[in-house]
Amino acid sequence: MEIKAALFCVALSLVGLLVWRVLVRWCGLRSAPALLLCLSAAVCLALTVPQAVAYGAPARLGQCLAHPAADLTYSIRIFGTRGLEDLMNVLLWVPPGLFGVLATRRFWYVVGGISVTMIVVELLQTIDPGRECDPGDWVYNTVGGLIGAVLGTLLIFVYERVRGRFRPTGRSGTAPPVRSGTVR
């Protein structure tokens, strides 16, 4: 089973490389953060997307959607009681949140994208009888993406502040004027 999961992770990483080229060339995203975003998202999806399909998916989906508010509040209330599983659900999506903000500079798009992706993944988990659709996992993964996005925003802020201090300035403390047509 581990070999199948490793091959699935490699396949998703290759898809991530293809998506990376599109994001950089056509969407104008920053190359290195976009590459790290695609690869980290590929690993996260390889760990969370179901790899088997079995009968009974509609019943499992109905069970997942029966009481979403109660399931969410219960999952939030018991956070940390399932050992490392809860913490790993949060930490898993920190890198895509971080690299997503560094690549796009769009905080809420990244957090919203991770949240919607996790809703789809949780619903897809109903097709695999060995997986469980847990609305709490959606919350934990979204919080992880949010933490990563906050870290990315802080890194951008610090970078811009440090870069601004070391820019060449004129006598008045402002950047020297640029004259059109002047060659230096």
Image (tube, rainbow, N blue to C red):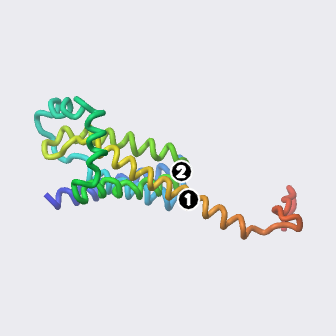
User: Does residue 15 show up?
Assistant: yes
Marking on residue 113: none
Say what secondary structure mark 1 lies in.
Answer: helix
Residue 162 in the figure: left or right of residue 17:
right
- Residue at the limit of the structure toward the left, as seen here: 55
Q: Amino acid at mark 2?
A: Thr
Percent x, y of residue 49: 26, 47
User: Does residue 14 show up?
Assistant: no
How many circles with numbers are drawn on the protein?
2
Label 2 belongs to which residue?
Answer: 104
Instruction: Kindly indicate the quadrant of the structure image that contains residue 132.
Output: top left
Residue 74, placed above or below residue 157: above
The residues bearing labels 1 and 2 have C-alpha atoms spaced at a distance of 14 Å
Residue 89 in the figure: left or right of residue 158:
left
- Identified at 61% across, 59% down, the residue is 157
Percent x, y of residue 137: 29, 46
Label 1 belongs to which residue?
Answer: 154
Say what secondary structure mark 2 lies in.
Answer: helix
Instruction: Kindly indicate the quadrant of the structure image that contains residue 8.
Output: bottom left
- Identified at 30% across, 53% down, the residue is 89
Question: Dot 1, how many residues are within 10 Å of its Cα: few (below 14), some (14-19), or many (20+)?
Answer: some
The quarter of the picture where the N terminus appears is bottom left
Percent x, y of residue 142: 38, 47
Percent x, y of residue 159: 61, 64
- Identified at 27% across, 44% down, the residue is 75
Q: First in sequence: mark 1 or mark 2?
A: 2
